[in-house]
Image (tube, rainbow, N blue to C red):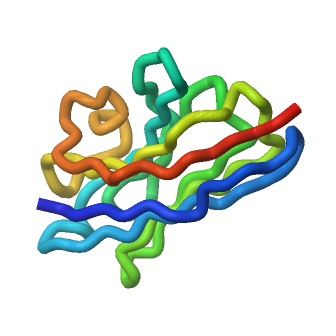
Amino acid sequence: QVQLVESGGGSVQAGGSLRLSCAASGRTASSSAMAWFRQAPGKEREFVASISWNGGSTYYADSVKGRFTISRANPENTVYLQMNSLKPEDTAVYYCAADAVTFRGPRTVATMKSVASWGQGTQVTVSS
């Protein structure tokens, strides 16, 4: 099982930037595809971005494509989400997630069905 701890959330004005971090620990932390999801008040949790186990492939929701960038530093077992040109509709709690099966690309974990571990979430608030 992979343990995940997010950090980096906060409040920012529209057009601003934030970088989220997710520290992963556990035996398979460096070999699991990872993803970011978000959940706004009164809405279902939705996919944001994901990255393959080795960082070679990424996948994004249409709503964030071109504005957000996911990356990972495997020696440190940390996944990042760089968020630029933030909009009020990006306001949500952001969750880091780890794939249940190792050595996979980014698309399976994006479906949420194969998520084995969740972080506790970090709040992102974008004001207009």
Q: Is residue 27 left or right of residue 13?
A: left
Q: Is residue 58 left or right of residue 108?
A: right
Q: How many marks on residues?
A: 0
Q: Nearer the viewer, residue 68 or 42?
A: 42
| Quarter of the figure with the C terminus | top right
Q: Is residue 73 above or below residue 127?
A: below
Q: Residue at x 57, y 35 (%)?
A: 92
Q: Residue at x 38, y 75 (%)?
A: 74
Q: Residue furthest bottom?
A: 75
- Quadrant of residue 102 in the image? bottom left
Name the spot of residue 12 as percent of width and height, x first: 80, 49
Q: Is residue 41 above or below residue 35?
A: above
Q: Residue at x 47, y 66 (%)?
A: 72
Name the spot of residue 1 as percent of width and height, x first: 11, 60
Name the spot of residue 8 as percent of width and height, x first: 59, 63
Name the spot of residue 50 as percent of width and height, x first: 44, 44
Q: Nearer the viewer, residue 113 or 23?
A: 23
Q: Residue at x 62, y 24 (%)?
A: 62
Q: Is residue 9 above or below residue 67?
A: below
Q: Is residue 89 left or right of residue 127?
A: left
